[in-house]
Amino acid sequence: MTTLLDSWRLLASRSGASLLAAGAIVWATLLPVAAAAAAAAPHGVITRSAVFLVYGVGRVVCHQRPERSFHWGAAPWPVCARCAGVYAGAAIVALLLLAWRLPSMPTVGRARWWLALGASPAVASLAYEWVVGVMPSHVTRMVTGVPLGVALAMLVLAMLGAEAEGLVQRTDEVD
């Protein structure tokens, strides 16, 4: 029974890591593509539906304020610049995971520390914005989101136990 349970756990972690990688890459790619399609005033029902779906998901995960978003022509992206950076960071981890074996994966406890570190640029830019009253550029907001996306992806991978199936190798760090 334990062997069967271990087999299911391995399958779930492998599937979870693969789904995370594919989903991160697809989602990060869909953001500018959907904005480009929206700016082009899509005519086909499939294209309009796809754009509607991407913007609908974006509405769930982001405030979608146009003044805080990149634009493609007249169409704002489905998420703000900082969220675009978060998703780009997760996609970077996914691409590295698919292209090469990552040399090590932190434990969940260590990944939480990386998450705190990865969030610090976004928190700092947010604090700057609130104190000074000036919104940083879209590029700055995106760049501060990238480390957060990297750290989030690493935390999820650590939680999925991606090292179990050989996608990454666990380090010998002690929490």
Image (cartoon, rainbow, N blue to C red):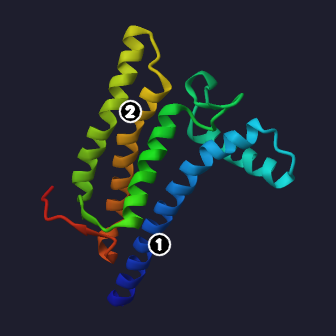
Decide: is 164 above or below 126.
Answer: below
Residue at screen point 50% across, 55% down: 24
Q: CA distance from mark 2 to mark 1?
A: 29 Å
User: Callout 2, which amino acid?
Assistant: Thr
User: Callout 1, which amino acid?
Assistant: Ser
Tell me if 34 is positioned left or right of 20 in this view.
right
Q: Residue 15, which numbered label? A: 1
Q: Quadrant of residue 116?
A: top left
Q: Quadrant of residue 3?
A: bottom left
In the picture of the structure, the residue carrying the numbered disc 2 is 144
- Helix, strand or loop at label 2? It is helix
Q: Quadrant of residue 56?
A: top right
Residue at screen point 41% across, 16% down: 129
Tell me if 173 is positioned left or right of 47 in this view.
left
Image quadrant in which the N terminus is located: bottom left
Q: Earlier in the sequence, mark 2 or mark 1?
A: 1
Residue 80: x %, y % from top left: 55, 32
Residue 38: x %, y % from top left: 75, 39
Of the pair 73 and 79, the residue shown nearer to us: 73
Residue at screen point 37% across, 63% down: 97
Of the pair 2 and 34, the residue shown nearer to us: 34
